[in-house]
Amino acid sequence: MTMTDSPQQERIIGERRLRREDPGLLSGENRFSDDLVVPGALHLVLVRSPHAHAKILHVDANAARSMPGVVAVLTGQDLQSEWAAPMPCAWPVTPDMKNPAHYPLATEYVHYAGECVVAVVARSQIEAVDAAGAVIVEYEELTPVLDLEDAVTDASLAHEELDSNASFVWSLDPNPEAVEAAFREAAVTVSERYVQQRLIPAAMEPRAMVVVPSPMGGDYTVYSATQIPHVLRVMLALTTGIPETKLRVVAPSVGGGFGSKLDVYAEELLCLVLARRLRQPVRFTEERGEGTMATIHGRGQVQYMELAANADGKVTAVRVKLLADMGAYLQLVTPGVPLLGAFLYHGVYDIGAYSFTCTGLFTNKTPTDAYRGAGRPEATYAIERAMDTLARKLAMDPAEIRRRNFIAAEKFPYESVAGLVFDSGSYQENLAKALDRAGYAELRAEQQRRRAAGDPRRLGIGVSCYVEMCGLAPSRVLASLNYGAGGWEAATVRILPTSKVQVVTGTAPHGQGHETSWSMIVADKLGISPDDVEVLHSDTAIAPHGMDTYGSRSLSVGGTAIYLATERVIEKALKIAAHQMEVAEEDLEYVGASFRVKGSPDQQLPLAAIAFEAFTAHNLPDGVEPNLEASISWDPPNFTFPNGTHIAVVEVDEETGRVQLERYIAVDDCGNQINPMIVEGQVHGGITQGVAQALYEEALYDASGQLLNASLADYLVPSAAELPSFELGSTVTPSPTNPLGVKGVGEAGTIGSAPAVINAVVDALADLGVTDCPMPATPERVYSLIQQATAAR
Amino acid sequence: MYPSSFDYRRASSVQEAIAMLSSDEDAKVLAGGHSLIPLMKLRLASPSMLVDIGRISNLSYVRKEGSQVAIGALTRHRDVETSELLAHEVPILSKVAGQIGDPSVRHVGTIGGSTAHGDGAADFPAALLALGATMVAEGPSGRREIAASEFFKGFLETALAPDEILTEIRVPTGFTKYAFQKFNRRAQDWAIVGVVAVRGERTNVGFINMGPTPLRATAVEERLSAGASVEEAAAVADEGTSPSADINASVEYRRHLARVLVKRALSELG
């Protein structure tokens, strides 16, 4: 589908416009939750469990209570009467899913190091910190469950009240006989085990919140660094019993989330009930060192990946079994994360036989939940690593094995074996463009030269082709997956009397530049300047309806809602214009912010004049209400399927094992682009996060379940200094799912990059016989792989 | 990440700072704060008083004095990095300074603070040890000079008395050839292992993070003076070291890196 605007109108969509958000961010003018000055606010500090698994024997808070500035010291028992319901999990993936009750403060047992045990409220942060240090909690330590492959044996239990560590088993087995047959008849099979290590999201802004009660009115304003003000309001109402009408949630400037702020946290609930109980504002800001333990983690899977293929490299079946680490509790969408990848383990390839099973397991570690890409990076990693292994087994070039298996361009819309309908794509063209951009043949020649010369600086080239499902999501599909909410998005477009435009969106930007992009969509459609369009968001009093921002959904769902609301406003303006101009509606066309008579361009009425008429309502046609405004809630008919090819070029230092990313080429197809500069920014950040998983990041635990790298000095988030300048390109196959033809790009970079980098590392060492490298590819790990391979030869 | 409460006093001269330190045995000197403040935030250090010497005006300088260059203790890493005098006379120090932390660290941290902290994982101490620098300390009983070889006593422990302040570092000129091999995973990180090699009339090699204190690679230096090749000397590089294991590297890998990095540093010297 293409956009329907008149070609005469100047296009704003597609311009590289600077982000209007940036001056406020760069100058420090923007206010984040912790910046908000709230007179009289009390400070919440949590006493957290130092143990991964223990029974709480005794809490002695007497000393803490008498310390200066302390207002309250409360245990889980003290607060138990405050809760109308436990903390929410909105995605019960199976009817028999086990979901142990999870309250903001532990009462009898603690199940991960960092779990909240005692709430300390004081007049200042420092007084609360000192008092928290004086709370004495006695524990009886219990055996922690830390490793997924141990957890699945149930040798010891993460939750003492459950009879198994398995929360659920979820399968997708559309054609089991075909899978059996494919493996039986395969000329070659691949069987691999991959570990998706735990990652710590590490948004630039830690979580922060402040709840302001109005003691007489009984209502509460919750300011929180959240991606989901709308969902949060619903969940706060359900867990505290406060009517939703008495809750206003505001997300001020929010400094990144990557999924970690797509959640409902104990501290948010605690601030709210403490504000209710103490009748004073209560605030909490996490320290980085507690955030790394108490904010959700991402990934955490063991993948057993199998491929069956013909001798010519055509893959005939995919069979995958997953163990997925839920952590200690099910947070908002924890069990659903592996399902977001469950349909995509065949990747961009036309494969007819498919089998997927996931076991969700409890461990005594920080809960996991959605982290940039959520399920799809894991799926892409498994298929793209396995395709490389298959290529190696068949002595085929990794690019060639991909070409032989791609879903052909003429097959779109493509109904996949897993039951999805891929909207559009041109995978061959995309790969060809990326290979060309990389100078693939020359890179291979250089690799051969270095091998022949015995150069200890080994060259590796890694190719990864990905497809993701995003634009979350068609509500009926979510229903079939048992998700507890819809996937629509709401928008209001109103033209004010002075013809300035207000857009209200249900999306909740936290770095994505929605204000810029949404203003461009509306300005493009109305033929006005984006500077005349204001975008309001992230406050439930201003934007009461919304499904918020995650899963690369905001443009394809929220942007479409805005586009359609703008269309409706124009339809209404057309009625008024026809009435005023005394012509038939069908004789008018809308060009350059004016209605004009077709064939007589001198006869025109500007939108500004109609806006004022709609305001005065002095002369409106019968049946037309005053004001130029339209609201839409749009539910997408399908997901969107961004895709692309990423190529990593690495140099591996044979003597030290150090991997240096030398070049990175990414050709992404996110459909039509509203603002290519923002697209590139998203791809840059995404690639960096995927490279981080491949080379740098991993939440490390000791044998007792203590997080070893809880500080950003030890948890290695890479910076620009570690990375080359990315070489970006794009192909464009507009999505037929929405009238903008857009697909979404927030997660693409993260999804394509980790397998590209690890494929490159393995490729660099392949002639030594190395076939796999666990993530992250640390220097010592790579060095020992080289040592082992050399010794084996 | 909130330190325990402490008194804060700002000294306007070295003498005043010494008097303040003498008045409280749990007092600590604050310069750039990049070593001390993180320890305080983790409550691994809880000094009763901080004596801030950061505003003492005459402790930031780099000047030639005979066959030495004198560097004021409050000289920022960035000033060491960009000093033309050092680039000419002791270029290894400029090179090392330019790779410490990140730009904001280099604009705040001081050479005296880093040295007085005595961290075996820090870059300056190993460089000063390799150079055979001299530390100048001032205390209630006056001024004394301490050789680098006598200065680093143990883990975060130096020869400075609690009421002494490191005021100046004197480094010899004449080491015209130099190499710095810093192995880390991110540019801003501490070295997993680092090697500082300098060559004038003789070749000195210092190790970063191969033990609780900065170390001299004595085995390497001895082999070299006995006429060994680079490869022969590098092969014994980890002799006499005592690296520890952490989340970045095992003991064996650190020893291996020490051998590789020494080989590279010595080859770089030419």
Image: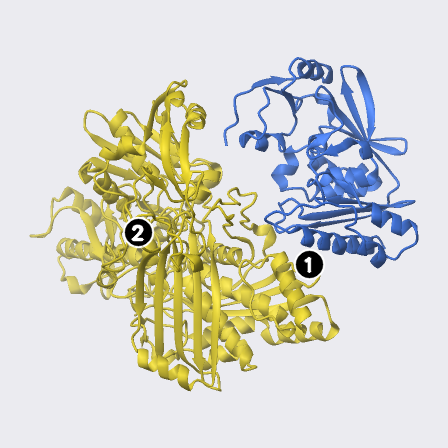
Chain colours: A yellow, B blue
Count of labels in the image: 2
Left or right: residue B69 versus residue A348 is: right
Residue tagged 1: A656
Mark 2 or mark 1: whose residue is earlier in sequence: 2
Q: Position of residue A473 (x, y in %)?
A: 28, 60
Q: Amino acid at mark 1?
A: Thr
Q: What label sits on residue A205 in the rendered view?
A: none
Q: Chain of mark 1?
A: A
Q: What label sits on residue A162 in the rendered view?
A: 2
Name which quarter of the figure residue A617 lies in.
Answer: top left
Residue reaching furthest to the left: A622
Is the residue at mark 2 from the same chain as the one at mark 1?
yes
* Picture residue at 43% right of the left edge, 35% below the top: A29
Q: Quadrant of the N terminus of chain A?
A: bottom left
Q: Chain of mark 2?
A: A
* Picture residue at 50% right of the left edge, 43% below the top: A710
Secondary element under disc 1, as helix, strand or loop, is loop
Q: Amino acid at mark 2?
A: Leu
Classify mark 2: residues with Cα within 10 Å, few (<14), some (14-19) or many (20+). few
Q: Would residue A519 be seen by someone viewing this image from the given angle?
A: yes
Question: Up-down: is A133 above or below A384?
Answer: above
Question: Up-down: is A96 above or below A212?
Answer: below
Secondary element under disc 2, as helix, strand or loop, is loop
Q: Check if mark 2's residue and mark 1's residue have beta carbons within 8 Å.
A: no
Q: Position of residue A16 (x, y in %)?
A: 45, 56
